[in-house]
Amino acid sequence: MSRIRSVAATTPAINRRTVLAATGAAAVSAGVGYALRPTDSQAATTASEAHEATVAHSRRVAAPLAPYTRGTTLATVAAPRTSTPYRRLGDGPGWSRVVRSELAAPKSGRAGRRTALAAFVQLTDLHLIDAQHPMRLEYLRATNPHSWRPHEALTVHGAVSLVERINALRGAPVTGSPLHFAMTTGDNTDNNAKSELEWFLKIMSGGKISPNSGDPRHYEGVQNSGLKLYWQPDSTVRDGDKQLGFPHLQGFLAAAIREVRSPGLNLPWYSTVGNHDAMPLGCYGHGDSWLAEYAVGGKKLMSLSVADSKKLQAHISAGDDPKGLAFRDLLKAHTRDMRSVTPDDKRAPYTPADYVKAHLDPAYRGIGPVGHGYSTANLDAGTQYYTFRISDDVIGISIDTTDPGGHYEGSIGTAQLKWLDKQLTDNKDSHAIVFSHHTSKTMDNTNHVDPARPNERRHGGQEVVALLASHANVLAWVNGHIHRNDITPHSAPDGRSFWEISTASHVDYPQLARVIEIVDNKDGTLSLFTTLIESAAPHRTDFADLTQTGLAALYRELSYNAPGASKVLGGDPDDRNTELVLKKG
């Protein structure tokens, strides 16, 4: 069994200082865009107190530490058990661990020498969907079948079940180390709606959630529209999805909007912003008053011609309508085709400042830290990036790769790039894990202007890769956005190297999150162990079970069967459960 050098292993005796620290994580350093300041958290102000602030949030384990694989994809993974057009899921064989040596050769005997430095969980692309929101693009299904997913009304149920799975993990799968925190790497919401943001914060911190908007008494959306373009679960209408084997489930929609309860994570959690969090539909900049009013109003477009769908999709793909003006004009042209729904102010878009303020709201503190990485310094500066201490030897850096000028691909501004360089330099004696939403290959949106910083240059993913590779303390860049498991080695000519770890979403099958463990092999190398996990919902579904758990299981099965869904998002074996070896900086 590995020797463990975890934060929790050095927990000091409880005293007034650690009690104060329990209200929030301490910043690595104070300043614009950083983590919490003492005035935000009443937490530590010295280096030793900063350590205690992290310790205060670490999960305690009473039992001896040992490898723990139960509930992970090492043990079992959902897999189809029928060959019918609509395939039912059951327990499938687990995914084995693959050792990757592109950046360093693994040395024998390391399992007996290794020391755990940190362990955490990454969640990404939850895409909590207000399925009845007027400003959604379901009608693009006329062109692309995956533009609307049959399971979208169940995103809250699926996310709560994922929280339940994380809470059930007794320790990290390889070392048994306590899990120090969870990080969400963006697209926590789907449509930049206040309703979705409230659901996300309650899921993560705990509370009762009504996954409904508009009329509190019943569902008003495409799934009871009678349109054959969408799965009509409560109706006997022979829609396109039922022709593919989707079931008739009487009472489905009433169950989908019924109140659910989240226990909240039982470990600290941090938040990184994604394009769907930052912009309506993940691609349109803020500012158009007509679109803002449409979002909370009483009309909803549910169908569109193939020709108009193709035209709108082309605009979105090209990124040539960053302010949504062409989208607005299309909606105006189809006003007479819209259906009446109940207006709801909770569907209003939220600004970046609203996003940070919501994280700072004491109602959503949960286990903490206060702000979940964000601070009043972020509010003052208008930023959404920060640094935090993970353990004695490791820092985390969350960056904002969204482009406020519009479009779904990412980039960062010069000020943030310089800030990132300074954080890595100032903390050169600590290993660094960088978190973002976008991947290096999807940060190619450098032509739009940031409305808040019109004279600032935007930088792409390859510039970020070059910067990270210039610092010997960078171990990994952890991100999402592409909804696919993908692990990429990055190396520099002088031998400096890091791994880019991209994790699949929790909205598209296979609906995964990832545990990442950092260990020192005591032989000049480090290893990053990555282990994927599913939600706690059973693999087998019961169409008669419309409880919270039953719907979470159905969420997974519907996502597997969703027309147009990709079957390769799980990635190759070497993108799943891995040991990633690299040289010690």
Image (spheres, rainbow, N blue to C red):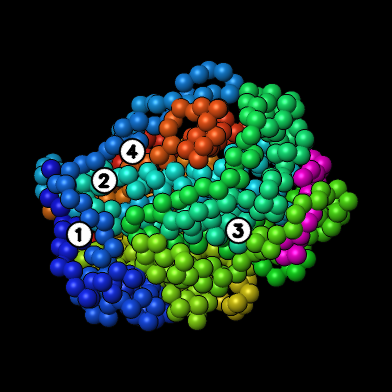
In the image, what residue occupies the spot 63% across and 26% down?
Answer: 247
Residue extent of the magenta highlight: 291-310
Mark 2 and mark 4: Cα distance apart in space = 11 Å
Kindly state the secondary structure of the residue where label 4 is placed: loop
Kindly state the secondary structure of the residue where label 3 is placed: helix
Instruction: Name the residue beneath numbered marker 2.
Output: 170
Q: Is residue 174 left or right of residue 563?
A: left
Instruction: Name the residue beneath numbered marker 3.
Output: 195
- Which amino acid does the dot numbered 3 rest on? Ser
In this rendered view, identify the residue nearer to me: 459 or 427.
427
Instruction: Name the residue beneath numbered marker 4.
Output: 72
Mark 4 and mark 3: Cα distance apart in space = 31 Å
For the N terminus, the quadrant is top left
Q: Residues within 10 Å of mark 1 (few under 14, many from 20)?
A: many
> Is 228 covered by the magenta stretch?
no
Residue lying furthest top = 83
The answer, for residue 320, to whether it is visible in the render is no
Circles 4, 3 touching at the beta carbon (< 8 Å): no
Total label count? 4
Circles 2, 3 touching at the beta carbon (< 8 Å): no
Residue lying furthest right = 336
Label ID, residue 8:
1
In this rendered view, identify the residue nearer to me: 293 or 224.
224
The residue mark sitting in front, 2 or 4, is: 2
Q: How far across and how far down the image is residue 114, in percent?
A: 15, 50
In the image, what residue occupies the spot 59% across and 21% down?
Answer: 85
- Which amino acid does the dot numbered 1 rest on? Ala
Q: Is residue 224 left or right of residue 508?
A: right
The residue mark sitting in front, 1 or 3, is: 3
